[in-house]
Image (tube, rainbow, N blue to C red):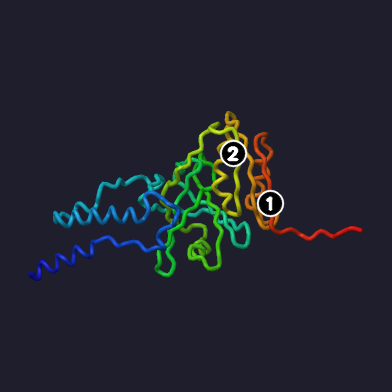
Amino acid sequence: MGEREEDDKEAWLQLRPVEPLPSQCCGAGCSPCVFDLYQRDLARWEAARASKDRSLLGGKESQSCPSKLSPETFLAFRISAVDKLTKDTYRVRFALPRNSQLGLRPGQHLILRGIIDDLEIQRAYTPISPANAEGYFEVLIKCYQTGLMSRYVESWRAGDTAFWRGPFGGFFYKPNQYGELLMLAAGTGLAPMVPILHSITDNADDETFITLVGCFKTFEGIYLKAFLQEQARFWNVRIFFVLSQFPHLTERR
């Protein structure tokens, strides 16, 4: 094999897609998953190498507006506000350009990418802002002491940039599809319920009856308490809180 052929082989190997690490998969069953994208890019690389045509590596990905979500490509969104709700939970607002809408349907979620110590990680989060919110979207994130993504999120400040892709999720809520919905949520598991609540109570023609049971440690630790209490004023919404901790009551004799 000549020196030129050896250099050409090395050049192609440098262009070969890198297989994702397990930490780069959020485990939420997304389609496409990062491993699906790797297999797609690998097949594209193999075809380009076989035909010796590097132009095939680019594919046909469109250069869409940054406000246009893509399940395959991470897009940058600017953080406009970080609100610390409890000692370990944050509500984060991201700006959308030109008062555009995110484009998610109630029931869908996004994938967040973070990098800690040169390790890329991905996690799934459901925006809690209304589906028709203009110019922004919000997420509810709980941080854990040993969580890698938690370290990344806790470093966020207004003006920083984070990268998201999506939408994902096969459950699409349709108005009046069901007579009643029972929602069971623990902690930040409340997040997927919020946009569906928004969708129902913002639509005067949607007569779906909702019962939400939210489980939290303490009454003070209930996330989005003011929002939930406001929602409970609607005729078709009932909300119950189940607490695992409560102050001891003084027994009266």
Residue at coordinates 14% horizontally, 56% vertically from top-left?
Answer: 52
**View extreme (right): residue:** 253
Q: Position of residue 44 (x, y in %)?
A: 23, 53
**View extreme (top): residue:** 205
| Disc 2 target residue | 181
> Could you say which quadrant of the image residue 11 lies in?
bottom left
In the figure, 119 relative to 92: above or below? below
Q: Position of residue 250 (x, y in %)?
A: 84, 60
> Could you say which quadrant of the image residue 114 lies in?
bottom left
| Disc 1 target residue | 242
Residue at coordinates 16% horizontally, 65% vertically from top-left?
Answer: 9
Q: Position of residue 169 (x, y in %)?
A: 45, 45
Q: Residues within 10 Å of mark 1 (few under 14, many from 20)?
A: some
In the figure, 250 relative to 225: above or below? below
Q: Position of residue 153 (x, y in %)?
A: 51, 61
Task: Locate the N terminus by quadrant.
Answer: bottom left
- Residue 125 horizontal side relative to residue 84, left or right: left
Of marks 1 and 2, which one's residue comes earlier in the chain? 2
Which element type, helix, strand or loop, lies under badge 1? strand
**View extreme (left): residue:** 2
Residue at coordinates 57% horizontally, 52% vertically from top-left?
Answer: 189
Question: Is any atom of residue 161 visible in this view?
Answer: no
Amino acid type of the residue that numbered disc 1 sits on in the rendered structure: Val
Identify the disc placed on residue 213.
Answer: none
- Residue 41 horizontal side relative to residue 138, left or right: left
